[in-house]
Image (cartoon, rainbow, N blue to C red):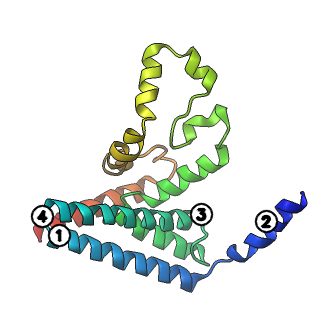
Amino acid sequence: MNEQSHSLRQFTRAYCTKNTPLAWAHLLGTVVVFVAVLGLALASWGNVILTGFWMFAAGVVGVRLYMLQHEAGHGTLMDKTIMNTRVGVALSFLTHCPFHQLKYNHNLHHAHIGDLDERGSTEIYTMTVDEFRRANWWDRLRYRVYRNPIILFVIGPPILAFLLYRLPKNWRDSGPWSLAIHNIGLLVMYGTILLL
């Protein structure tokens, strides 16, 4: 290890310790802001611009919730594994991302990142330059459309959250009962909201 990487490791070591009280503060603060922003969006219903603004803000805060769920999936949010799991499962109803499936598939992603023989385990399909050049025109077109930023960042996320996460990749290996409970919980949550 060279001296530069050693000093970087020393510099970042202070940020590698788990701080459960700080994690709770981040978690509860983010949930409060998320609920408040959704409330403001509902209160402004009818004003398209204002509602759109608050829904966009809710999306930004939702990304923060997903980041906290992601850390729980890695077991780095809280001191105890059971608390990471409980927080991750609870957040799954706000992020629409089933926690056990996220954890399983994301750990596969980390295990195989950069391994061209295991690309099926990553979230976004990637072709090498040589594969793209050898591909027929139809496959090139499909790949270009798929990798377009509008597809990846605007159209893709709702499809992922509302359709593909209802029966995600490797769901049998990562706990079909937890997925069923998650999906039923979402139905109950949205059913309750619609009845109010």
Instruction: Mark 3 and mark 4 in contact? Answer it, CB < 8 Å.
Output: no
- Relative vertical location of residue 70 with respect to residue 127 in this rendering, above or below: below
User: Relative to 101, is 183 on the left or the right?
Assistant: left
Identity of the residue drawn at 55% across and 83% down: 22
Q: Earlier in the sequence, mark 2 or mark 1?
A: 2
| Of labels 2 and 3, the one closer to you | 2
Pinpoint residue 57: horizontal percent, then vertical percent: 32, 65
Quick one: 166 or 126, which is closer to the camera? 126
Instruction: Mark 2 and mark 4 in contact? Answer it, CB < 8 Å.
Output: no
Q: Earlier in the sequence, mark 3 or mark 4?
A: 4
Q: From mark 1 to mark 3, how far is it between C-alphas?
A: 34 Å
Query: Which of the numbered marks, if any, corresponds to residue 47?
Result: 4
| Of labels 1 and 4, the one closer to you | 4
User: Relative to 8, is 39 on the left or the right?
Assistant: left
Q: Kindly identify the amino acid type of the residue bearing the numbered disc 2.
A: Leu
Badge 1 is on which residue? 42
Badge 2 is on which residue? 8
Q: Kindly identify the amino acid type of the residue bearing the numbered disc 1.
A: Leu
Badge 3 is on which residue? 74
Pinpoint residue 85: horizontal percent, then vertical percent: 51, 69
Query: Which of the numbered marks, if any, corresponds to residue 125?
Result: none
Q: Secondary structure at mark 4?
A: loop
